Amino acid sequence: MPEPIDIQLKKGVLGLCVLAVLARRENYAYEIASLLSGAIGMGEGTIYPLMRRMQTDGLVETYLVESSSGPSRKYYRLTPAGHQALKAQSDEWRGFARAVDALLEPVPADPQPVTEV
Amino acid sequence: MTRTEFIDKLKIGLSGLPASAIADIVADYETHFADGTAAGRSEAEVAQALGDPERLARELRTEAGMKRWEDTKTPSSAMGALFALLGLGAIDILILLPIVMGIAGGLAGTFIGAIGAFFGGGALFAAGPWMPLPGQPWAALLGGLGLMAGSVAVAALVAIFTIWFVNALVWYGRLHYRLLKPALDARNA
């Protein structure tokens, strides 16, 4: 069983990861779920409640793409608000990760004040 | 668990939502199974990776209930959000529920009291001048008016506080299940 810090970290950045994956390429839910379960080990089922919430919040939108085999497929893409959220959250994440990395150094090499984000 | 078992449990868990919403959600998971088997995984593997369908259904239903509260602030949508949170187990039955119920009961009681005071004020205003009350007739008239105005103000305050209170519950519930969910997943894995 993973440590609680691991679980809470993953849960906190899951939304950010989905935004980042969709910024690279517009995608469908199964692909997003496989990518994220491979990369950070999230439960695949979690993606659907999350996508619905992000759609409610106006961060992503869906469109249908005709498929040669079987029914048409639902794709997700970022809205302008989604792009903004990605920018804001990734800045926040990078600032936070830098600050934690600095604290993990055994000897403070060169004390750098952490800029507020 | 097979695909059919998973979908059946999901449907049972979602019952109560509008049929179109259920069909939408079920289609998402059906597609997931189709994609999974196309990628060479067995139905059981896909189902296991998805997690507990009953818990997913509860989370999806809570999201729908909270969205309804955000869209329309009515007493029934407030109750819907509260019961969805209870169903999720996000409100601790032993510690939080008595507090929540206490506040909800207090609000309801104050509101009913305000309605009573409003009609009492109306009666005083209408009948006061002819009743054997101390003081002048106009004192009963003004007193009745004052009581009515005061009770309207109290009722308005109760309404504002109730909206704030349910919003706080929704916020708390979302925070709670975002943290709770992966912990449960990890335990099941």
Image (cartoon, grey):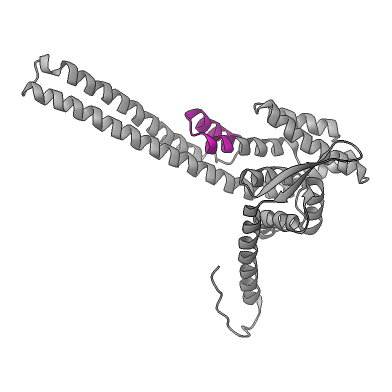
User: Which quadrant, please, contains the N terminus of chain B?
Assistant: top right
Residue B129 drawn above or below residue A97: above
The residue furthest bottom is: A110
> Image point 41% across, 31% down: which residue?
B105
Residue B184 drawn above or below residue B74: below
- Quadrant for residue A105, please give it: bottom right
As for residue B77 lying within the magenta part, the answer is yes
Q: Position of residue B112 (x, y in %)?
A: 35, 26
Nearest the viewer among B123 and A2 is B123
Q: Position of residue B104 (x, y in %)?
A: 43, 34
> Image point 70% across, 28% down: which residue?
B20
Q: In this view of the protein, can residue B131 be seen by the observer?
A: no
Q: In this view of the protein, can residue B29 be seen by the observer?
A: yes
- Quadrant for residue B85, please give it: top right
Nearest the viewer among A19 and A15 is A19
The residue furthest right is: B40
Q: Position of residue A12 (x, y in %)?
A: 64, 56
Q: Position of residue A37 (x, y in %)?
A: 79, 53
Nearest the viewer among A105 and A72 is A72
The dominant secondary structure in magenta is helix
- Quadrant for residue A17, please give it: bottom right
> Image point 75% across, 37% down: which residue?
B53
Tell me which segment is drawn in magenta. B65-88
Instruction: Please give left or right for residue B25 compared with residue B86 in the image.
Output: right
As for residue B9 lying within the magenta part, the answer is no
